[in-house]
Amino acid sequence: MAKDRKNQRAVPTTRLRRFARVAKLAGGVAGGMLAEGSRQIRAGKRPRAKDMLLTPANARRVADELSKMRGAAMKVGQMLSMDTGDFLPRELADILARLRDNASSMPPRQLNQVMENAYGEDWEQRFYGFEFKPIAAASIGQVHRAISPDGREIALKIQYPGVAKSIDSDVDNIASLLRLSGLLPDGIDIQPLLDDAKLQLKDEANYLTESEYLQAFSRVLGSDDRFVLPEVLPEHTTEQVLVMTYVSGQPIEVIAELPQAERDRVMGTLIELMFKELFELRMVQTDPNFANYLYRPSSGEIVLLDFGATRHFKASFTNNYKRLLKAAMAGDETRLLAAAEKLGYVVEDASEEYRALVLEVFLMVLEPLTLDEPYDFGQTDLPARMAELAEPVQDFKEFWQAPPTDAVYFHRKLGGMFLLASRIGARVNVRELILQWL
């Protein structure tokens, strides 16, 4: 019980308290930089600002403080951590990657207040056997088990108080912190990304919207026996509490211990679903967190969870992305650069050297599509080769730009699928899977 209380922290709900948290974080990071700088000077070294900032202590400081704040502050950190190398320094992504772990949970008193606000003081009579200990705690809400009035096992996703109201200020405060840190490259205008992040997060903070997405995916995938999705209980769902049937399963990573054929089948199924979402539905669940997928060993079914980060894509984006993929598969460099330009990557006015570098990046990222054979995600050295390109990119700062917003969201999903496939050592013929949509 003591351990449970240790992981409970009240969510700061007012804008002033949340700003104070960010200010405290900035002060802590600055203090950490001074301490590291002094240490390096005593050791006879000439410290660089980047080296002083990116210390393990500062990494813990950033991740721990954002996980206590939760809400949009933590979500922005998660989003940036999965940027898959579009424009953020790798070191920053590594710091923010700590935020993929579970957040702190609300103490019972604050939880009870949220439920009273949603259902009244007698809310416990509506949900039998409500378990106050959450089974999961994330950036925007935490999940509890209970029994519905009709006797079904249910899961309640309960939003942290103040999350929706603090989105704009949280995003602005974290962006200011990143700018002041010097980690964001100079000259990059990330305001369009920030503005879009606010809109996306406001959608995520409305659980009625998420319930609509969940029901839409259920209609599309309901007849596909490879998947299991929760069922929404709309009569009990509000903007701050999403009530759905409880579905069980094991963490998706357990398939890493299964025979190669099953690993390949499961991963191929998830990659195929990703393409279906983008090209057929134009509705993509963009959160790549592994916790959004469960596996049922007895049946081989994949459980799909958490549709809050679902995003609609315009036909123009999906069509231009098709052109990009077709060009990469055909090895047509001219068409590939033209498609990248249409997607919003500025390459037409860049130097020949920079265009060549952009081309190399795209061909490398899309490598699994260029081979008409199973791609061995567990053995590929693609991440290492991508890391080697980071140094040449430094020579072209005058052409740096924030990537197109839709591309950032889809590449988060794409990067998440790559990480999962690598983690479980899957071999998938990606080219064969995507042909039906091209």
Image: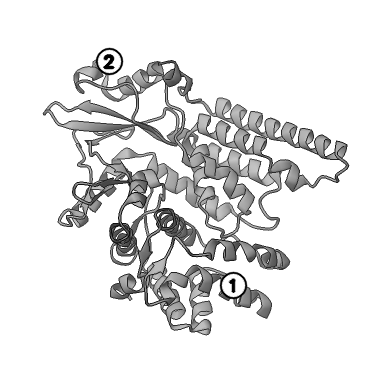
Mark 2 vs mark 1, CA separation in Å: 59 Å
Q: Nearer the viewer, mark 2 or mark 1?
A: 1
Q: Which residue occupies 61% across, 27% down?
A: 20
Which circle marks residue 23 in the picture?
A: none
Give whichever of 93, 209 is nearer the camera: 93
Give whichever of 253, 84 is nearer the camera: 253
Q: Is residue 216 above or below residue 268?
A: above
Q: Is residue 240 above or below residue 133?
A: below
Q: Which residue occupies 75% across, 42% down?
A: 52
Please name the amino acid that badge 2 sits on.
Glu
Check the picture and name the quadrant holding the N terminus: top left
Q: x%, y% of residue 396?
A: 70, 68
Q: Which residue occupies 69% across, 67% down?
A: 392
Q: Residue 260, can we see it? A: yes
Residue placed under numbered mark 1 in the picture: 358
Assess disc 1: are there few (<14), some (14-19) or many (≥20) residues with their C-alpha within 10 Å of its C-alpha: some
Label 1 secondary element: helix
Q: Is residue 436 above or below residue 383?
A: below
Q: x%, y% of residue 185?
A: 68, 55
Residue placed under numbered mark 2 in the picture: 121
Q: Is residue 329 left or right of residue 381?
A: left
Q: x%, y% of residue 136?
A: 36, 33
Please name the amino acid that badge 1 sits on.
Val
Task: Residue 312: name its quadrant.
Answer: bottom left
- Counting residues from the start of the chain, the first of labels 2 and 1 encountered is 2
